[in-house]
């Protein structure tokens, strides 16, 4: 049996999930994942805005991610991977008192005064 060797490369094309999208943030010592249904104002494939339909809260990425899947809030594997990555970053930020901003790199170091470093 031949084993293929595949070089990992990022998937650059954005494809909207028909189930909607998430806004993830930290509030009151918990990770919050808001799910929005897609709303398009035109006839094209562009998503213009969303309608909030679910809010999932918790302290760990696994429980929130499993809840998202169990509730059927995603339809695309690439979207699930992206959400899992964001939830893990939020969990690390929550545990270590770091600032979390969705789709931004997590700054893992602080200076002697507790300020996040670049």
Image: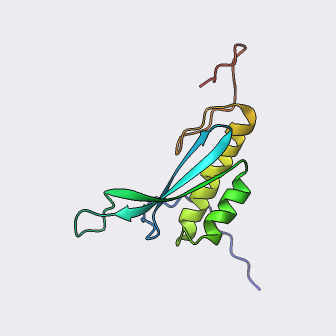
For the residue pair 87 and 2, the one nearer the viewer reads as 87
Asked if residue 54 is positioned above or below residue 58 in the image, the reply reads below
Hey, which residue is sitting farthest bottom in the picture? Answer: 1
Asked if residue 16 is positioned above or below residue 85 in the image, the reply reads below
For the image, the number of numbered tags is 0
Hey, which residue is sitting farthest top in the picture? Answer: 113
Q: Residue at x 74, y 33 (%)?
A: 96
Q: Quadrant of residue 8?
A: bottom right
Hey, which residue is sitting farthest left in the picture? Answer: 42
Q: Is residue 37 left or right of residue 91?
A: left
Q: Residue at x 31, y 57 (%)?
A: 48
For the residue pair 52 and 79, the one nearer the viewer reads as 52
In the rendered image, residue 29, in percent from the top left (x then y), is placed at 68, 38
In which quadrant is the N terminus drawn? bottom right
In the rendered image, residue 78, in percent from the top left (x then y), is placed at 55, 65
Q: Quadrant of residue 118?
A: top right
The colouring scheme, among rainbow, by chain, secondary structure or one colour, is rainbow
Q: Is residue 40 left or right of residue 65?
A: left
Q: Residue at x 66, y 64 (%)?
A: 67
In the rendered image, residue 71, in percent from the top left (x then y), is placed at 60, 70
In the rendered image, residue 108, in percent from the top left (x then y), is placed at 68, 32
Q: Is residue 93 left or right of residue 34?
A: right
For the residue pair 5 and 26, the one nearer the viewer reads as 26
Q: Residue at x 30, y 63 (%)?
A: 46
């Amino acid at each position: 049996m031949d084993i293929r060797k595949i070089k990992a490369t990022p998937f650059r094309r954005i494809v909207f999930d028909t189930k909607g999208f998430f806004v993830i943030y930290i509030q009151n010592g918990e990770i919050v994942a808001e799910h929005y249904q897609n709303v398009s104002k035109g006839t094209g494939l562009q998503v213009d805005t969303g309608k909030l339909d679910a809010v999932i809260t918790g302290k760990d990425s696994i429980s929130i991610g499993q809840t998202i899947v169990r509730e059927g809030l995603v339809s695309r594997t690439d979207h699930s991977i992206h959400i899992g990555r964001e939830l893990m970053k939020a969990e690390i930020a929550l545990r270590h008192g770091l600032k979390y901003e969705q789709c931004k790199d997590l700054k893992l170091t602080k200076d002697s005064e507790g300020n996040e470093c670049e």
